[in-house]
Image (tube, rainbow, N blue to C red):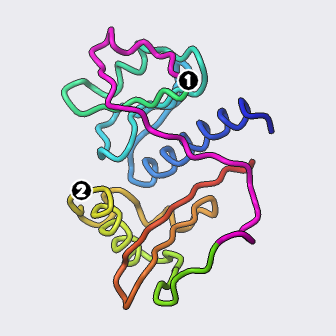
Amino acid sequence: MEIPDLHAAAALNLVGWHDVHLRALGFPTQRVGGLWLTTAPVPVIFFSAIALGPGASAATAAGCPPRDQWVAVSDPWGDLALAAHGFTPEGEQAWMVRHPASTAAVPPLPAELVIERVADAEALHDFEIASAWGFGAEPQPAATWHAPAILDDPRFTILRGRVEGRTVATSMSYRDAR
């Protein structure tokens, strides 16, 4: 896969992650004007719109959802002219994308750290609490950010690291068919 294809695949993976999460939480999503978007007010960890490729409609992105609430748009190609619609950039977000690779080079974990796959609603809520702390946010009620239905989706891997029964690390991945 060439780098431009990897870039596009990463953007579509971002869309998939958002789409599965928001639908599981009961929010409507759609694809229009070269964008994936939702017209509903969503929790602040989610984008309201994501450009699917270069040349997406800035006017469409600016119209979702109503502007009396917080709205975030992801522009992986950096060509959406959103300033004319009252948007301001809030910094760059690094993309983390790589070709699949062997895990043979993974260093050993500390003996006291136990890595567990999150498999039920209680563990998912614990994951949400630890994730909130890690991002400097206040923990939210269960299923505010991650609905238990995502646990049944094989494209997700949700892990927590625990020391003496306390969650000290979290990780989540979403993989599409490619």
Which sits earlier in the primary sequence, circle 1 or circle 2?
1
Question: Where residue 133 sits in the image (x, y, percent)?
Answer: 27, 64
Apparent side of residue 81 relative to residue 96 in the rendered image (left or right): left
Query: Is most of the magenta stretch helix, strand or loop?
Result: loop
User: Which mark identifies residue 142?
Assistant: none
Using a 10 Å C-alpha cutoff, classify the residue at mark 1 as few (fewer than 14 neighbours), some (14 to 19) or many (20 or more): some
Q: Residue at x 50, y 85 (%)?
A: 114
Foreground residue among 66 and 131? 131
Question: Where residue 72 sits in the image (x, y, percent)?
Answer: 35, 32
Q: Residue furthest right?
A: 1
Foreground residue among 113 and 150? 113
Is the Cβ of the residue at disc 1 closer than 8 Å to that at disc 2?
no
User: Which mark identifies residue 137?
Assistant: 2
Q: Residue at x 40, y 77 (%)?
A: 123
Apparent side of residue 104 relative to residue 11 in the rendered image (left or right): right
Query: Please, what is the three-letter code of the amino acid marked with disc 1?
Result: Trp
Q: Which residues are magenta?
A: 78-106
